[in-house]
Image: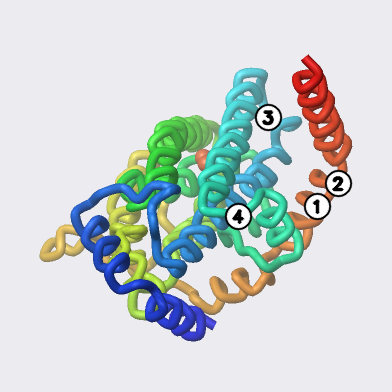
């Protein structure tokens, strides 16, 4: 699938005006931002639409596993914090859908692609949230991994995407800290609470490492995205940075990272870690994640339940336009 996609991109680029292409390449190489009205190769536009909409879908679907726990948060403070966090994720989805729309796609098309299963979203959200400790682990690990992925995107070559990332990254760092604080409370709580925290770490650790995508030698889209400066660092580089930052945090919590091969490597100045189960990753990408069907059902239901709001907003806008025209 990846190869044909890459071939299609190469063919599309081959048909572009060489002069415009050279000018575009030079701008990107000079770290200039590309803006919506600027000329861009079709393959660049398509890659960005795919990446930004996938990112937007991940934010929106990512509201579901935590949304499940809003009614069961253990205190009013935890409820208020979680509510704010889940709302932030909704906001991230909206900025990103808007950024994708500047490339000539529409919100309806993107939503349709998600609901029909054509568009992907982060595999991590197809895992279930079994206990309150999962809310801590998600904030700490999943939002932590999101930050690692997104910080370099603040300098991605497409202006609207880069600018959306600046605000998103600020909010993600709040999300990461609220998750860590939940873990800290549980890890320092009763023996049962500490067991819950450890169990959540055990279940979320490996799926979090998968969030950085396939290994570099098996990620054929990466090279082109690096040349276009859509991507600024490789999957394996960012994954390594995440492991190096997160292992000491697990130690501070008094929890054990579920990896027997995890070991500090003095020579590389980072941790060596065990093999990731890529079979599991690809199975989840194919839609076989533990709660993939529930997630899509919840999304589609929310979309259908909200139809009257969209209709009312459109009717209101039409009436206003009519009134303005009459005046
Ligand atoms: Fe987010
Ligand atoms: Fe977040």
Q: Is residue 301 left or right of residue 228?
A: right
Give SS at disc 3: loop
Could you tell which of marks 3 and 1 lies nearer the N-terminus? 3
Q: Which residue is mark 3?
A: 73
Q: CA distance from mark 3 to mark 4?
A: 38 Å
Categorize mark 2 by other alpha carbons within 10 Å: few (<14), some (14-19), many (20+): few
Pick out the residue farthest to the front: 326
Q: CA distance from mark 3 to mark 2?
A: 27 Å
Give SS at disc 4: loop
Q: Are marks 1 and 2 in contact (CB under 8 Å)?
A: yes
Q: Is residue 137 visible?
A: no
Image quarter of residue 94:
top right
Q: Is residue 296 left or right of residue 151?
A: right
Image quarter of residue 82:
top right
- Checking the image for residue 304, the label placed there is 2
Residue 45 horizontal/vertical position (percent): 47, 61
Residue sitting at 45 percent across and 37 percent down? 168
Could you tell which of marks 3 and 4 lies nearer the N-terminus? 3
Nearer the observer, 255 or 158: 158
Residue sitting at 65 percent across and 42 percent down? 63
Q: CA distance from mark 1 to mark 4?
A: 20 Å
Residue sitting at 35 percent across and 72 percent down? 17
- Checking the image for residue 300, the label placed there is 1
Mark nearer the viewer, 2 or 4: 4
Q: CA distance from mark 3 to mark 1?
A: 25 Å
């Amino acid at each position: 699938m990846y190869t044909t996609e890459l071939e299609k991109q190469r063919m599309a680029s081959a048909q572009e005006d060489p002069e415009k292409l050279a000018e575009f390449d030079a701008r990107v190489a000079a770290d200039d931002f590309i803006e919506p009205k600027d000329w861009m190769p079709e393959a660049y536009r398509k890659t960005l639409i795919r990446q930004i909409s996938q990112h937007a879908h991940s934010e929106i679907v990512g509201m579901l596993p935590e949304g499940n726990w809003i009614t069961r948060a253990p205190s009013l403070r935890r409820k208020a914090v979680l509510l704010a966090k889940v709302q932030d994720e909704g906001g991230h989805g909206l900025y990103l859908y808007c950024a994708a729309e500047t490339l000539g796609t529409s919100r309806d098309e993107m939503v349709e692609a998600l609901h029909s299963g054509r568009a992907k979203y982060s595999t991590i959200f197809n895992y279930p949230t079994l206990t309150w400790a999962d809310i801590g682990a998600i904030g700490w690990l999943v939002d932590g991994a999101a930050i690692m992925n997104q910080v370099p995107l603040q300098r991605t070559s497409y202006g609207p995407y880069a600018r959306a990332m600046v605000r998103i990254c600020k909010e993600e760092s709040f999300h990461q800290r609220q998750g860590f604080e939940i873990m800290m409370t549980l890890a320092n709580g009763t023996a049962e609470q500490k067991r819950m925290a450890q169990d959540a770490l055990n279940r979320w650790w490996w799926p979090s490492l998968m969030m950085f995508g396939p290994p570099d030698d098996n990620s054929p889209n990466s090279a082109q995205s690096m040349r276009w400066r859509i991507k600024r660092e490789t999957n394996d580089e960012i994954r390594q940075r995440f492991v190096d930052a997160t292992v000491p945090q697990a130690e501070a919590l008094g929890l054990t990272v579920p990896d027997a091969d995890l070991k500090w490597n003095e020579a590389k100045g980072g941790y060596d870690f065990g093999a990731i189960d890529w079979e599991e990753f690809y199975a989840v990408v194919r839609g076989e994640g533990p709660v993939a069907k529930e997630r899509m059902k919840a999304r589609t239901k929310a979309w259908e339940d909200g139809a009257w709001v969209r209709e009312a907003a459109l009717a209101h806008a039409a009436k206003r336009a009519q009134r303005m025209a009459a005046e």
